Image (cartoon, rainbow, N blue to C red):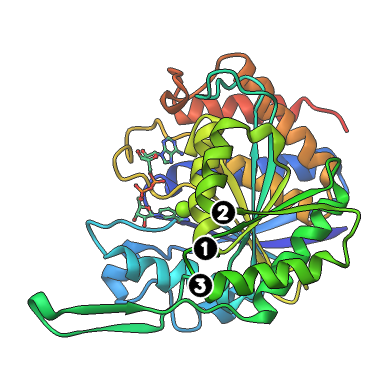
Amino acid sequence: MATYDIAVIPGDGIGKEVMDYGVKALQIGAEIHGGFSFEFQQFPWSCEYYQQHGKMMPSNGIEILNGFNAIFLGAVGLPALVPDHISLWGLLIEIRREMRQYINLRPVKQMRGVQSPLASPKDFDIVVVRENSEGEYSPIGGRMGHNENEIAIQNAVFTRKGVDRAVRYAFELAVKRDKKFLTSATKSNGIIHSMPFWDEVFHQVGQEYNHIIQQSTHIDALCAFFVTKPHTLDVVVASNLFGDILTDLGAAIMGSIGIAPSANINPEKKYPSMFEPVHGSAPDIYGKGIANPIGQIWSAKMMLDFFGYEEIGHLLLEAIEDTLEQGIATPDLKGTSSTSEVGEAILGTFKKKQK
Ligand code: NAI
Ligand code: MG
């Protein structure tokens, strides 16, 4: 029987409140299937860890994680303890890059039982493929000068290899889906070097996928389309920053950032992939017991899919939607239930599902 070793990093804030439900969902998934199991090992790497050790994870942290089949992360960052750029680059971005998780998959889907804030949305089902290893998130640049003469320079890095593999992944995903339609997020009118290059690679790779409908859309217009006509979109490929912003908007049209999941994928499976909700540590609600656990649980579904148990993943998503349809929801979805009430209801519904 296959056993998957999972490194669990709850992290900071509400990450510590929602993680348990994600882990239990994985365990129940394995029980329903009967043909595989999970082994979990938890790590305390977080801003509190930083306060004690001066770093977000031990210097051999990447080496330790490399021994696992996947990483399950809650959220990282507590700006009151550690500046965000230190906590993010010291753990999350470090893992994404060192583990070559160059694809970040983020579904944006209308959920049964959730009222989208859009006035009269038609059924939408989008997957954003975010380039996850380079682009605008770059350590290159610097600051100089003082006061009115101060200058900050931030260089974006786009490589042919990096853009090609992200775009190719998105085309392959579009091939597997019904609409066979890929939109590339660009801004080649304003960003005159990297974005025309991005468009060029998109066009070149696209010639190998003639049967896929393909378009380049400026990111500003695309943001508007997420609001005005999300049902017309299918797969969207975007650079690191564009994909990040677009998927918070995606989470908002789904109903709440608290339900959005993501998967950081190393497609070659040479390194472990990492599954985590889109949301952060939400310091404003931490400790109140009202964090929505669905982003974490849906991320567990993405892990099940990744290991090839898509039928189990499908049942888990059904359990989430069944629960929402019963009106069991946290305050971010205008419900009155707590984290544990929503979490337990979903797990209970999932348990009753038969393969
Ligand atoms: P955030 O996602 O933590 O919170 C934004 C808003 O959404 C807040 O009002 C929060 O209460 C609400 N929210 C988020 N998740 C929720 C959930 N599960 N249930 C109910 N409401 C939820 O983003 P913010 O405030 O910009 O960042 C807070 C910290 O998290 C920062 O340190 C930031 O760097 C970090 N962060 C970490 C991420 C990660 O680990 N992947 C992603 C985004 C932010
Ligand atoms: Mg974000």
Task: Choose the circle earlier in sequence order: 2 or 1.
Answer: 1
Residue at 60% x, 24% y is 345
Where residue 221 appears, x then y in whole percent?
A: 54, 46
Say what secondary structure mark 1 lies in: loop
Q: Are marks 2 and 1 in contact (CB under 8 Å)?
A: yes
Q: Residue at x 59, y 18 (%)?
A: 120
Q: CA distance from mark 2 to mark 1?
A: 8 Å
Q: Position of residue 172 (x, y in %)?
A: 83, 59
Q: Nearer the viewer, residue 21 or 233?
A: 233
Q: Nearer the viewer, residue 187 or 64?
A: 187
Which of disc 2 and disc 3 is earlier in sequence?
3
Instruction: State the residue in front, 188 or 332.
Output: 188
The residue that label 2 is drawn on is 218
| Gap in angstroms between the C-alphas marked 3 and 2 | 13 Å
Q: Are marks 1 and 3 in contact (CB under 8 Å)?
A: no
Q: Amino acid at mark 3?
A: Ile
Q: Which numbered marker is on residue 192?
A: 3
Which one is closest to the eye, mark 2 or mark 1?
A: 1
Instruction: Compare residues 236 and 256 and report the one nearer the observer.
Output: 236
Q: Which mark is residue 135?
A: none
Q: Position of residue 6 (x, y in %)?
A: 65, 61
The amino acid type found where label 2 is placed reads His
**The N terminus: image quadrant:** bottom right
**Cβ atoms at labels 3 and 2 below 8 Å apart:** no
Residue position marked by numbered label 1 in the rendering: 189
